[in-house]
Amino acid sequence: MIYPDLIYFIKESRKRGLSDSEIKKLLLENNWKNEIINENFSSLHLASSSQKPIQKKSVTINLDSSIITILEKRAKKNMMNLNEQIEDIIRRSAVNARVSSPKQEKLDDLLIPLFSRKRN
């Protein structure tokens, strides 16, 4: 059986630099059955092999030490390292920019000034 929480744990552990054997050891210590662990690792491997690998590019930014301190506090609160926190902020910003496309006015709203009794 596939457990979404277990899949999430595996992905997050990998991001944090743990090897698959270290992750399996942690799961076994926390009473997960070996068959379930292997099944979830296999499903994760199948899902990732069917997707194209993500190509990352490097970007360099220069920040004041005060901003870095703020970002480090936020990263600690979110249980991330500084790089992950900055990447998360940029990713969210890009997603929000893509989603917030300019809204078209409804036809009714465009006709209100034409038929309104008030004149500006």
Image (spheres, rainbow, N blue to C red):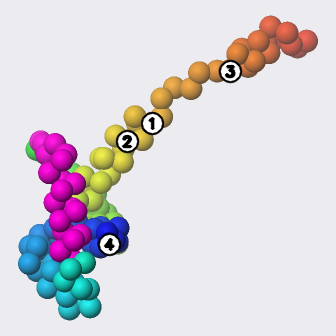
Secondary structure under tag 2 reads helix
The magenta region covers: 37-57
Separation of marks 4 and 1 at Cα, in angstroms: 35 Å
Which residue was labeled with disc 2? Answer: 95
> Which residue was labeled with disc 4?
1
Quarter occupied by the C terminus: top right
- The reply to whether the magenta stretch includes residue 47 is yes
**Residue 32 position within the rendered picture, expressed as x and y whole percent measured from the top left:** 26, 86
Whole-Å distance between the Cαs marked 3 and 4? Answer: 48 Å
Magenta-drawn stretch contains 23: no
Q: Earlier in the sequence, mark 3 or mark 4?
A: 4
Mark closest to the chain's N terminus, 3 or 1: 1
Residue 24 at x, y percent in the picture: 15, 80
CA distance for labels 4 and 2: 32 Å
Q: Amino acid at mark 1?
A: Val
Circle 1/circle 2 CB separation < 8 Å: yes
Q: How many marks?
A: 4
Q: In 3D space, how far apart are the residues under numbered discs 3 and 2 (Cα atoms)?
A: 25 Å
Q: Give the amino acid type for the residue marked by disc 2 in the picture.
A: Val
Name the residue beneath numbered marker 1.
99
Q: Secondary structure at mark 3?
A: loop
Mark 4 or 1, closer to the camera: 4
Read off the residue under disc 3: 106
